[in-house]
Amino acid sequence: MSEELLAPVHNMQDPNPWYALTQDHSTFIDQSAKEALLRNNDTWSRRVLLPVIRPLARLSIVIFRFIRLFLPRTFTSSKALHNLICWGMRNFVSRDANYLILRHFNMGSQVLRFLNDNLSDGKLPGHPLHPLKIEDLRDNVFVQHDLNIYNFVILMNQYLRTHNKKLTPVPLDQIDFSAIKDFDPELEEFPNTWHNFLDLQSAIELYTPMFALLLSREDFERASNSLQLDETIAIYAATLFNKDAIMGIVNNKHPMVPLSTIEAGFRLMLHGLDAENLYGFIKYVRDSRDGALQAA
């Protein structure tokens, strides 16, 4: 973060918005992730390039979606998509943005396993994703991440019906937090050269049309609609903890009313924020319980 954002004092007549948010602790986002995101917000890339990139990217999505009406599965390649993403991340995306991207997949897998452990006795099969370096993402990680969410929802509800169960709160002292582990120290040292300048939002806006171009029509629509499952996953967690207030931190909602794919890039940013908040909340409850047990 810039020296201005780290300053211990601020100008009362000209407060820095990003510094204000670094001081705010009303959400549950890990401080390291929050600072990485706010550094992104303070870059020239987001201020100058994003307003140019966003409309061009959305126009590209419209064009590629039109093409896919007539060629729904022709010339698709998930492998090419992932290779292109990894090449861009290695050569152009900033260190902070790469850090947040790798965090997202690790958090997602941990949260799904946590819910599996506590709501379905750990019985659901899964495909956990724990990429620790950019090259790990080449193995279809972006597409598999979306598949994992859908498969979890389907398998969880099949399990509940088969065992004649319903989602119910779990007493705090019986909740298994073993799935939630710190992984930041295991992440690679990300590139930080002069050409790694692209902020997270700009990178996402650039990559989203590539999903529309290189994935089939059905795959891209499924990936876009999966963002709205943030609400579904949050409901599971809210039920587990008996904390309806969790729903207040969810941005992507109403999965039965699909939104336009044109704004998928912006909603993907909100998806990342939702994931950080939910993961942070689970860690907060774990640490609070452990602290209370130690004090007893």
Image (cartoon, rainbow, N blue to C red):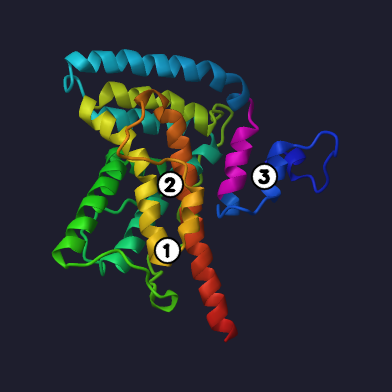
| N-term-proximal mark, 1 vs 3 | 3
Spot occupied by residue 269 in the image (x, y as percentages of width and height): 47, 36
- Residue 216 in sight from this viewpoint: no
Nearer mark to the viewer, of 3 and 2: 3
SS category of the residue bearing label 3? helix
- Residue 171 in sight from this viewpoint: yes
Mark 1: amino acid: Ile
Residue range of the region highlighted in magenta in the rendering: 33-44
In the image: residue 76, left or right of residue 197: left
Quadrant containing the C terminus is bottom right
Residue at the spot of label 2: 104
The residues tagged by marks 1 and 2 sit, at their Cα atoms, a distance apart of: 13 Å
Q: Nearer the viewer, residue 225 or 192?
A: 225
The residues tagged by marks 3 and 2 sit, at their Cα atoms, a distance apart of: 20 Å
| N-term-proximal mark, 3 vs 2 | 3
Magenta stretch: includes residue 81: no
Please report the residue visible at 38 percent of the width from the left and 62 percent of the height from the top: 239
Q: Is residue 288 above or below residue 50?
A: below
Quadrant containing the N terminus is top right
Spot occupied by residue 96 in the image (x, y as percentages of width and height): 55, 40
Spot occupied by residue 263 in the image (x, y as percentages of width and height): 42, 26
Q: In the orientation shown, which residue stands out farthest toward the bottom?
A: 296
Q: Is residue 98 above or below residue 239?
A: above
Residue at the spot of label 3: 21
Residue at the spot of label 1: 180
Nearer mark to the viewer, of 1 and 3: 3
